[in-house]
């Protein structure tokens, strides 16, 4: 589309200009210019609820991609009693403006129809942010390893827990030496551990800077690039587990606070123990799961789960949506 006469504008935060192709026009999010661009654009594309926008014109179209292909935590209408009233109001207003949503599985398609106050069309296209997992990614992995000073032959374990409402790290893993040793013994290779905190608790990153076995990745600009470079993801309730499942990569879950989380944070769409990912509640159990990991069994469990949700990711979601946008604009 960049070479087909489309003027593509990307609303950015300050300092993000260099992350875009030179033919994409960056405009500062929240600025007057951003409002002008929104007012005159033929198509809006967003991956979260709009915090502000001008009134949507009759011939404008709004495509909502959402920011994950699948999620563990219940969201939107399914979590109505656990979300702030101000957010719910914004979400409902945003849903009324939206024309299309994109889904990467039948499960997500049905959930969007049920839980998003959305009356438009849910396109079963796949998830554009996950196309990267189907491409040759040598350059991306090289960019990540160079950024962190990691040899290209070193395996990467990424620890990426989600946030808690109390914005503390008390339920996070804090000691990584035993984990690194277990990974190196089990998989007979050198490993580095990166940690990436959720933006809501990014201010806690300094708590993890004292461990020599951990490299801080909280400020790395693109989570998808980290996942591309990652060989094993360790998380808790983050939807990043499902991105890695699409990539067919190793995922393990560390959930020491599962009962408290269910009682005070969010309900879940899936029984966490029925997911295809090895599950640990203590550091000792986590090390045991590493040593007991069976690649063949994991692959079978992953395939069965993807079949159960009728996953339809092909790596061509972005091109499918580009075709849709061309049809809208012409």
Image (cartoon, rainbow, N blue to C red):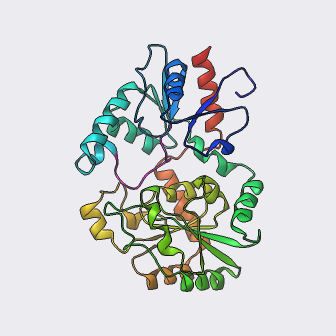
Residue 305 seen in the current view = yes
Give residue 127's quadrant in the image. Answer: top right
If the image is split into quadrants, where does the N terminus sit? top right
Where residue 46 sits: x, y (%)? 50, 35
**Does the magenta run of residues contain 70?**
yes
Is residue 278 visible from the viewing direction of this image?
no
| Number of numbered discs on residues | 0
Quadrant in the rendering for residue 302? bottom right
Residue 187: percent from left, percent from top: 66, 79
Q: Is residue 178 above or below residue 90?
A: below
Tell me the quadrant of the picture where the C terminus can be found: top right
Nearest to the observer: residue 299 or residue 320: 320
| Left or right: residue 270 compared with residue 10 | left
Dominant SS of magenta comes to loop
In the visual, does 290 lie left or right of 139?
A: left
Residue 220 covered by magenta stretch = no
**Residue drawn at point x = 62 percent, y = 56 percent:** 247
Q: Position of residue 196 (x, y in %)?
A: 53, 64
x, y (%) of residue 240? 51, 57
Q: Quadrant of residue 291?
A: bottom right
Magenta region, residue range: 65-75
Measuring 33% from the left and 35% from the top, which residue is drawn there?
Answer: 90
Residue at (47%, 78%) from the top-left corner? 174
Which residue occupies the foreground of this view, 89 or 288? 89
- At x 59%, y 25%, the residue is 324
143 or 99, which lies in front? 143
């Amino acid at each position: 589309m960049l070479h087909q006469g489309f003027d593509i504008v990307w609303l950015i935060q300050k300092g993000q200009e260099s992350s875009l192709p030179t033919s994409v026009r960056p405009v500062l999010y929240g600025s007057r210019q951003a409002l002008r661009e929104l007012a005159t654009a033929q198509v809006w594309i967003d991956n979260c609820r709009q915090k502000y926008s001008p009134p949507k014109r009759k011939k404008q179209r709004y495509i909502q991609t959402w920011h994950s292909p699948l999620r563990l935590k219940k969201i939107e209408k399914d979590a109505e009693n656990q979300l702030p009233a101000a957010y719910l109001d914004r979400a409902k207003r945003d849903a009324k403006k939206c024309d299309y949503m994109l889904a990467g599985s039948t499960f997500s398609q049905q959930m969007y129809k049920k839980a998003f106050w959305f009356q438009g069309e849910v396109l079963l296209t796949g998830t554009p942010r996950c196309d990267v997992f189907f491409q040759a990614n040598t350059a991306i992995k090289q960019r990540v390893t160079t950024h962190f000073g990691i040899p290209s032959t070193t395996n990467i374990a990424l620890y990426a827990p989600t946030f808690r409402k109390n914005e503390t790290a008390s339920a996070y893993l804090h000691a990584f030496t035993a984990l690194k040793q277990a990974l190196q013994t089990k998989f007979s290779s050198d490993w580095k551990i990166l940690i990436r905190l959720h933006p809501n608790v990014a201010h806690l990153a300094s708590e993890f800077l004292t461990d020599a076995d951990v490299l801080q990745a909280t400020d790395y600009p693109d989570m998808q690039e980290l996942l591309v470079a990652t060989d094993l993801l360790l998380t808790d309730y983050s939807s990043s587990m499902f991105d890695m499942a699409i990539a067919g990569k190793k995922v393990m879950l560390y959930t020491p606070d599962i009962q408290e989380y269910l009682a005070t944070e969010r309900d879940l769409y899936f029984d966490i123990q029925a997911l295809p990912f090895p599950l640990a509640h203590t550091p000792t159990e986590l090390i045991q799961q590493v040593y007991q990991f069976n690649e063949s069994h994991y692959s079978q469990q992953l395939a069965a789960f993807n079949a159960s949700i009728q996953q339809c990711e092909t790596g061509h979601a972005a091109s499918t949506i580009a075709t849709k946008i061309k049809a809208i604009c012409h």
